Amino acid sequence: MSPTIDEVAERSGFSTATVSRALRGLPNVAPSTRDHILRAAEQLNYSIDPYASRLATGRTMTVGILVPLVDQWFYNKVSTIAEAVLSAHGYDVLRYSITGSESRSQLLRQIATSKRVDGIIIVTTPLDQDDERVLTNADLSVVTVETVTDSFPSVACDNLTAAMTATRHLVNLGHERIAIISGLVEDPMRFPIPRDRKRGYLHVLQENDIEFRPEFDVPGNFSYEGGAEAMTQLLSVRQSPTAVFAFSDEMAIGALKTIRDLGLRVPEDISVMGFDDHDVSKYVGLTTIHQPVAQYGDIAASILLSVLAGETGDGGFNRELPARLVIRSTTGAAPA
Amino acid sequence: MSPTIDEVAERSGFSTATVSRALRGLPNVAPSTRDHILRAAEQLNYSIDPYASRLATGRTMTVGILVPLVDQWFYNKVSTIAEAVLSAHGYDVLRYSITGSESRSQLLRQIATSKRVDGIIIVTTPLDQDDERVLTNADLSVVTVETVTDSFPSVACDNLTAAMTATRHLVNLGHERIAIISGLVEDPMRFPIPRDRKRGYLHVLQENDIEFRPEFDVPGNFSYEGGAEAMTQLLSVRQSPTAVFAFSDEMAIGALKTIRDLGLRVPEDISVMGFDDHDVSKYVGLTTIHQPVAQYGDIAASILLSVLAGETGDGGFNRELPARLVIRSTTGAAPA
DNA sequence: CTGTTAGCGCCTTCAG
DNA sequence: CTGAAGGCGCTAACAG
């Protein structure tokens, strides 16, 4: 079996209490004593049992990351970065994903009662009053990404403005028949992001006296395939769009395939723009809105760390990061 | 504070022992008793403290997944799926990624002594004798993916054959100047995959009396960018290649960009093929070798689960899954 | 079928 | 600066 703290105590000639202090770097241990103990631990190849430690301290030293659908670039990026900074600070991280069957609230309640984590990063998922209360009552530190509440600190970009920028880009190119490939086909949770982006789109349409056509709003489920399907639907409309703004790069790329399979040219016949700036977008020449996804993970993790460290950063700490237009080759002047 | 087992015992009128048994679904509990206890637990919103439980049982009910560089499609896919099946079976999962600074062996040793996991899925990473011993001594159940040892069960495809298939496809199209964009620039761990694929490539070259040109082997680091850079290097060679076989789709896509930026056409001027069948590949029309990545995660998790359950499946259980050529539009006849 | 009694390995007062 | 002792919440024999 692996060595316990008692063996280290015995070998070093000190009590387990002193060994515990020494190993954790606490004060009130004589330097020579500490050396002695560290050496003994080293020789025994000893390592603190994290679970026993947790039981004794009440701190789990693990945090959760909650994402809606883990198999998307955005979520992978955010969680990967967050994991890296968290684990660099000694935390274990558990990824939770909301699958179809469990509702967000159930999962949240389960996490809250499971005594498994000290804190959690909630990505993109909206929270209602109940959810917030459950989290607060469970004494969990929480940070949200791309969703804001008035209870927890958050990191996000201004989706409304970003969508306006995207739409304006298209309008400025002379497009008037501009469609959107929006969010989820079924959206029981009412994700705020697609809504904000659509509002930005509508705003710019109105600003330019362009009438919104309901058939120009087709959901794409944030997937390649969904984007491709949405596009075939959009192209089947009489007076089909000359430009499409997809709410994620994956959907935009799906749309591109549909367009090209039909023998249409991009951007000569139709312009396409995405949102996110997926790692692959640069390589397929997709015009898009770049949002600092990696930073979301980085900053969210850092905030969570400081909250866990007890640094009471005056409560509501909502960071808004800039998004920007990246023009590549899938958008161009509207056809004559 | 959250309720403890004692409170449930008190409220239900049974001892903690019986409560423990009832809650875990163990036998030797009268149905009515169990009902009673479950109800009490429910009312208290009680949930077993996993860390206390771990301490008492010695089983952590958590497993690790070790990947080299987590920010790649392949690893995300494998680990996401594996996480899903593992957590469906009550396990927590911790992702470990080998970063530049820590060596594989260090990490492995750390994991082995950390007492944190019962088992681990090791993806793509080669293991030497020492590594294997460390893992075995720590009494960890291990399953490997895309790397085989004679100590642990594994899942993989036949990279040699798959690479031969890929190369033959190119040869059959009339190509003779076939380059590869291979693995890591620096490969201290000596990953077996790029080696196997290169062997397959060389084999087919030889089979067809095509001489291997060393300048036709450029590493691409398995990234979009690396693939793009490798391609510019390949195109700067006198008598540059008419076909390129990249060892991952990301690299192939990077290469495509370089080619097109230079005004060359694909596949008329140059053919490109990848490996993996990345989710995006279908949408960019990339010819590639499809390997069942999701299944790797699924099967590896299942095997690990059965090993953890003590089902001694006669030791070496090496599953080899089929890979297949998927012809799309980036490969074509060699230019005249 | 149920309860009692020891721990699991570590941390934390509280003395010294 | 160091040690003794009790307890974190749960499980595992062993009795009954």
Image (tube, coloured by chain):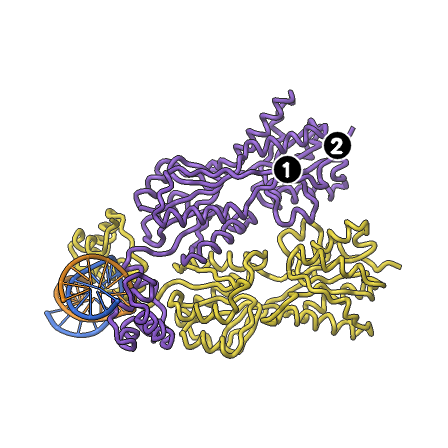
Chain colours: A yellow, B purple, C blue, D orange
Amino acid under disc 2: Ala
SS at circle 1: strand
Q: Which mark is residue B325?
A: 1
Task: Tell me if B312 is positioned left or right of C10 in this view.
Answer: right
Q: Nearer the viewer, residue A233 or B21?
A: B21
Is B17 located above or below residue B294 in the figure?
below
Q: Using the numbered discs, state the Cα–Cα distance from disc 2 to disc 1 in whole angstroms.
A: 16 Å
Say what secondary structure mark 2 lies in: loop
Residue A44 in the image, given as x and y percentages of width and height = 24, 48
Residue placed at 45% from the left, 63% from the top?
A64
Q: Quadrant of residue A51?
A: bottom left
- Residue B333's label in the rendered image is 2
What is the residue that sits farthest to the right in this orientation?
A336
- Percent coordinates x, y for residue A138 in the rendering: 40, 74
Residue B84 falls left or right of residue A62: right
Q: Chain of mark 2?
A: B
Q: Is residue A99 above or below residue B282?
A: below
Q: Position of residue B172 (x, y in %)?
A: 69, 28
Q: Residue at x 67, y 58 (%)?
A: A226
Please tell me which residue is depicted at 72% across the width and 41% down the height of the picture. B329
Classify residue A218 as left or right of residue B26: right
- Chain containing mark 1: B
